Amino acid sequence: MRRLLLIPVFLWLILQALPAQGQNNITNNKRWWKAGVAKTVITPQEYMWMAGYAARTSPADGKLHDLWAKALALEDAAGNRVVVITTDIIGFDRELSVSVCNQLEEKYGLERRNIILSSSHTHSGPVINRNLSLIYPPFDAVQQEQVEHNRTFVEDRIITVTGRALNSLAPARIASGVGYARFAVNRRENPWDEQSIYNPSLKGPSDHVVQVLKISDPLERPLAVLFGYSCHATTLDIMKWSGDYPGFAQIEIEKMYPGVTSMFFAGFGADQNPLPRRELALAEQYGKELAVAVSKVIGDPMMELSPSIQTVYHEIELELSPPPEPEMLEKSLAEGADWQKRWALLMKEKLASGEKFPETYPYYPVQTLQLGEQTLVVLGGEVVVDYAFALRKALGNDLMVMGYANDVMSYIPSERVLQEGGYEGESSMWVYGHHGPYAPGIENKIVREAVQQVQKLKQTGATAMKQKQ
Ligand SMILES: [Zn+2]
């Protein structure tokens, strides 16, 4: 009896301890976000082939730190939900992405447009399904079995961790802001040598913005930090599992804010490398640099977001160039690197068999989200930095951009990079198994789709606001 009496007293004491706004948050959930976050280890269960580089000749032989899949579930005041899943992997191909999303829909009722599957593009993780398949030497039966087993393992973990995030939804506040970190260097313009650190005039565009979403409880105690940077996770090429600089950044942030889950997403950094690189201390340095940039944003005033979610997801067709000429294939077979020879042989066989080459990539995912006042454009593929500038020009500097999401099927060159050619404009298409580069017009098509989606979101948002008034 005495114990029962103590409960209301205890509750009263808690409410007294909250600031006035905190009381409103808790007693009137309708006005607030709900957020839930969960994480799970996805380090491969055996030493298998590592993702990203053509030059590797053996499987992984150790681990610097674990790889993670993390899920952030958000619910707005009207009950709309979105889930952001970040992973320390090279990228989701379409098949894996569709499979994951179908299960998330079936199990948790999440629509495709309300799911973001983001990859950090670490080059120190495992091969994932068929992503980048032509870059690797042909696998033997055991290696192939490891790839398939790991795919199922990663997929299962993602489904489970998303369920845990959804089950932990609780009142929350969300704020956004931006910081700055300079270690991304335009890799097309700056071939790196030891003298480069003395050269202050790096060439070519880079996007040094650090994008941050802070998720806190009603008392502003941080629960999760979602942060993005536009640079390849290619500091390291050793044979040990790690998340590269994004992995170190996430560890560092979680050390700075005990209990917080930190989640990295890759921006539009396909033509950017962390330079100089290839030393463990540099991966740690860039991770710490990014973590400090994130903590500065969190320490400064941020833009508090109203609890509303709107999303659009479309897959659009991207035109491809005509098939390669036989002479060009013969040249690749005679002079190319091993991965070029594998591609040329495959294309030669396709030409000989009379197989029709596709005219488009028909599934290019363009997704946009309006989280309160914050707009986010999420693109598939390895997107070059020009898209960040083009989209910010059209939609404002407050825009957040995420690449390497939903389906990583190729590099996504801007018109400039396509015309210039090179790896990001042309030859990278081969390691992804495509017959050739995209056709001109790709940049306009993607930017137009994203801008139209955002305009639609804003119109819907404005109509909803009017109806409320
Ligand atoms: Zn890449």
Image (cartoon, rainbow, N blue to C red):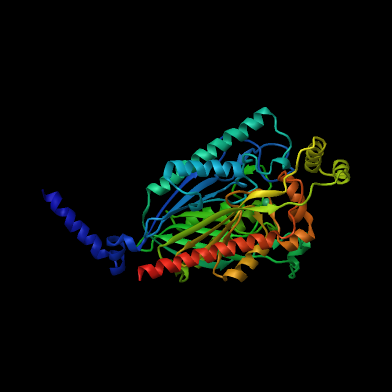
x, y percent for residue 454: 54, 64
Tell me: 67 left or right of 10.
right
Location of residue 239 (image quadrant): top right
| Residue at the outermost left position | 1
State the residue at coordinates (57%, 71%): 396
| Residue at the outermost top position | 141
Q: How many labels does the image show?
A: 0
State the residue at coordinates (70%, 33%): 139
Location of residue 63 (image quadrant): top right
Tell me: 358 left or right of 119.
right
x, y percent for residue 466: 39, 70
x, y percent for residue 9: 17, 58
State the residue at coordinates (72%, 40%): 136
Q: Nearer the viewer, residue 312 or 22?
A: 312
The correct choice, above or below, for 156 with respect to 373 in the image is: above
Q: Which of 450 and 92 is in front in this view?
A: 450
x, y percent for residue 462: 44, 69
The correct choice, above or below, for 148 with respect to 7 in the image is: above
The correct choice, above or below, for 364 with respect to 99 in the image is: below
Location of residue 415 (image quadrant): bottom right
State the residue at coordinates (78%, 60%): 419
Q: Can residue 396 be seen in this view?
A: yes
The correct choice, above or below, for 316 with respect to 451 in the image is: above
Q: Is residue 41 visible?
A: no
Tell me: 178 left or right of 123.
left
Image quarter in which the C terminus is found: bottom left
